[in-house]
């Protein structure tokens, strides 16, 4: 894929459903889903995160890249996308399928973004998008990830989280953000809960 094509339209099938399912069975707590996110949900996430008006975007848990591709299709030419992915086969797939100078892949935990942003002396990000399955994490891990989200986003930035567990994340979001909304997208397998949080509380 060349850069121009990533801006026009994200690629369709990236890995087979069978390969994705294999990754889920290898490490279900990390992978957290039995198949990649549908294009409809990816578009809805980009709409909630206001990607066309964003300059700096972070994605926590890129997986095989269905949301990554949609972000790159909508991100301005001078935009920047930092992606985090810990599952090695998915990271390898991203390296092989995404060729776009706006995209920087970190094959490590998204919590490390705090350090990376400091090292790069970058201002806060306009949007943080996460599909990491919070309900499979310990309370300490969830809190560390939310801390990374809040440290990364600007005061008027937006955090969008896709979660299949409908009730785990909302109490944590309400503790850390002044505004939290929820959309349910039924045309995804399984149906997706999309949480949008703004106005982070800095403790
Ligand atoms: C539910 S999958 C979604 C993948 C992809 N974004 C999609 O929508 O199809 C969650 C992804 O988060 C990744 N992940 C889990 N914990 C992570 C962490 N601490 N840092 C970065 N990625 C993580 C998993 O390896 C997996 O690829």
Image: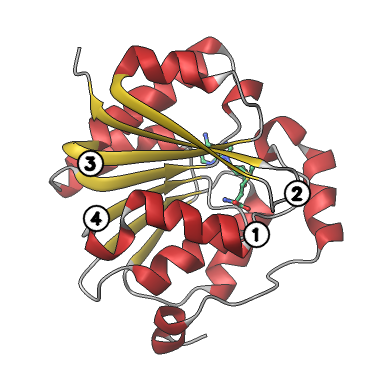
Around disc 2, counting alpha carbons within 10 Å, would you say few (fewer than 14), some (14 to 19), or many (20 or more)? some
**Which residue is the site of mark 3?**
157
**Location of residue 62 with respect to 192 vertically, above or below:** below
Q: Secondary structure at mark 3?
A: strand
Cα distance in 3D space between marks 2 and 4: 29 Å
Residue 61: give x, y in percent of width and height. Answer: 53, 45
Residue 38 marker:
1
Mark 1 Cβ inside 8 Å of ligand 1:
no
Q: Residues within 10 Å of mark 3 (few under 14, many from 20)?
A: many
Q: How many marks?
A: 4
Disc 2 and disc 4 in contact, CB within 8 angstroms: no
Please give the name of the residue rendered at 69% of the width and 37% of the height, measured from the top-left corner.
32
Residue 157 appears anywhere in the view: yes
- Asked whether 18 or 198 is in front, the reply is 198
First along the sequence among labels 2 and 1 = 1
Q: In the rendered view, tell whether residue 89 sits above or below residue 61.
A: below
First reached walking from the N terminus: tag 2 or tag 3: 3
Q: Which residue is mark 2?
A: 189
Residue 40 in percent (x, y) is at 59, 61
Ligand 1 quadrant in view: top right
**Residue positioned 41% across, 57% down in the render:** 46
Percent position of residue 110, x then y: 43, 38
Instruction: Please state which of residues 153 and 157 is positioned toward the viewer in this rendering.
Output: 157
- Which is more N-terminal, label 1 or label 3? 1
Q: CA distance from mark 2 to mark 3?
A: 29 Å
Q: Are marks 2 and 1 in contact (CB under 8 Å)?
A: yes
The kind of secondary structure element at disc 4 is: strand
Q: Which mark is residue 56?
A: 4
* Comes first in the chain, label 2 or label 4: 4
- For the residues labelled 2 and 1, the Cα–Cα distance comes to 8 Å
């Amino acid at each position: 894929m060349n850069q121009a094509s990533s801006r026009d339209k994200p690629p369709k099938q990236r890995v087979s459903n069978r390969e994705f399912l294999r990754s889920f069975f290898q490490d279900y707590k990390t992978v957290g889903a039995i198949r990649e996110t549908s294009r409809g949900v990816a578009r809805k996430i980009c709409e909630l995160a206001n990607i066309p008006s964003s300059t700096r975007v972070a994605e926590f848990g890129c997986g095989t890249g269905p949301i990554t591709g949609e972000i790159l299709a909508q991100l301005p030419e001078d935009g920047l996308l930092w992606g985090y992915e810990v599952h090695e086969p998915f990271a390898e797939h991203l390296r092989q399928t995404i060729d776009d100078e706006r995209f920087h892949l970190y094959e490590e935990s998204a919590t490390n973004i705090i350090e990376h942003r400091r090292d790069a002396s970058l201002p806060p990000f306009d949007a943080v998008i996460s599909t990491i399955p919070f309900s499979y994490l310990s309370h300490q891990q969830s809190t560390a990830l939310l801390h990374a989200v809040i440290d990364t986003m600007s005061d008027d930035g937006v955090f969008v989280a896709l979660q299949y567990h409908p009730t785990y994340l909302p109490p944590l979001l309400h503790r850390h953000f002044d505004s939290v909304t929820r959309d349910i997208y039924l045309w995804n397998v399984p149906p997706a809960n999309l949480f949008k949080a703004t106005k982070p509380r800095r403790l």
